[in-house]
Amino acid sequence: MLKALFDLAPRALRLLAPEEAHELTLKALELGAYPNASPDPPMLATSFAGLTLRNPIGIAAGFDKDARVPDAILRLGCGFAEIGTVTPLPQPGNAKPRVFRLLDDHGVINRLGFNNGGHDAALERLRRRPRHGVVGVNIGANKDASDRIADYVRGIDAFYDVASYFTINISSPNTPGLRDLQDPAALRDLLTRVFAARAKQMDAGNPKRPIIVKLAPDIPEESLGEVLAVLTQQNVDGIAISNTTLSRHGLRDSNAREAGGLSGRPLFHRSTVMLARVHRATGGNIPLIGIGGIDSGGAALAKIEAGATLVQLYTGLIYEGPSLIGRIKATLTDAVRRHNVHAISDLVGRRADEWAAKSLEG
């Protein structure tokens, strides 16, 4: 009964304004109003940058900005959770309305602007939770920070004891100038300082925490090689591809004119092509997280075959509901058996060349 009601929730929630629906979802998860997932088959277990996960599925940053429900996400059946994006100081984000559903396109446009309660509030919640499961922390910079790179260093320092890994978010389009940190020179400076902060923690006897960089899907093709050269030289532990896009290619919904980052089904093709190109350019030597437009088991499998070791969902859950997680796992399990391989990790990148050859716009 609880599962049936939970699966009906997405349709009911779409009767509310997007941010109201999101807050109601978080409150339901806080109250435990959801069914616990069944155990995963061993063939879905995977590893990423030294972390061991029971399956490759997570919910992307932006869903749980303030670390309110990471354990609920794990109990829903995800192999990992990621909180944030969190900034050193609380900030309200951009003016409302700032989230728009594109029902005709199964997409969402948001211009939230890193609205969150700041480091202290999220840190307190993470310190209270039991230390089990993989929970990453997605860190960003305050809009008015005089030294944005220093904000990322503060994130490493603040959450080092409670984070399974860190994601460096330099790719949101909703904080003016943030994507400038993807410029190779700025990126090199950022990573030098972030890795120095991690080295200081390790020198103090703390374990190594993987550091992942999240890229925008709108990096010009002629610049992607330079960006990847910096990431490779700096020995990043992983790359997340991708954040939301500013492209409006092929949209039909009237809300397509809204400013902000586009997520959901319209992002799937662009982000998957970029994912495959990064996998090919790095020789598969840097593990990747595939994000963007995953709203079916087939879409998740396509990300893995294009080069993703892990995948993350968000907008797909808005349209498909939490049963999407189980459906994806069923598809991945079937694919492992169909291809007669040992584990889902054996399918990573098997169609990367095919995807990389496609046009970004489809």
Image (spheres, grey):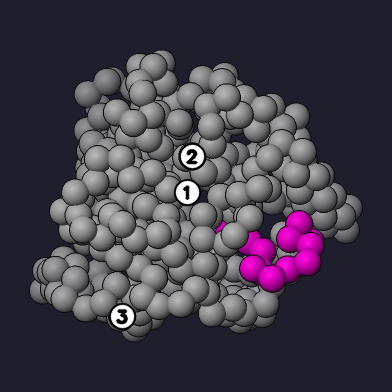
Q: Position of residue 64 (x, y in %)?
A: 45, 69
Residue on which the image places disc 3 = 20
Secondary structure of residue under mark 3:
helix
Rounded to the nearest angstrom, the CA distance separating label 2 from label 3 is 29 Å
User: Disc 3 marks which amino acid?
Assistant: Glu
Does residue 89 lie above or below 53 as drawn? below
Residue at the limit of the structure toward the front, as seen here: 257
Residue lying at 44% horizontally and 64% vertically, measured from the top left: 111
| Nearer to me, 46 or 249 | 249
Q: Where is residue 28 in the image (x, y as percent from the top left)?
A: 30, 80
Q: Position of residue 227 (x, y in %)?
A: 65, 32
> Can residue 47 be seen in the rendering of this structure?
no
Circle 2 packing at 10 Å, graded few (<14), some (14-19), many (20+), is many
- The first of marks 2 and 1 along the sequence is 2
Residue on which the image places disc 2 = 218
- The first of marks 2 and 3 along the sequence is 3
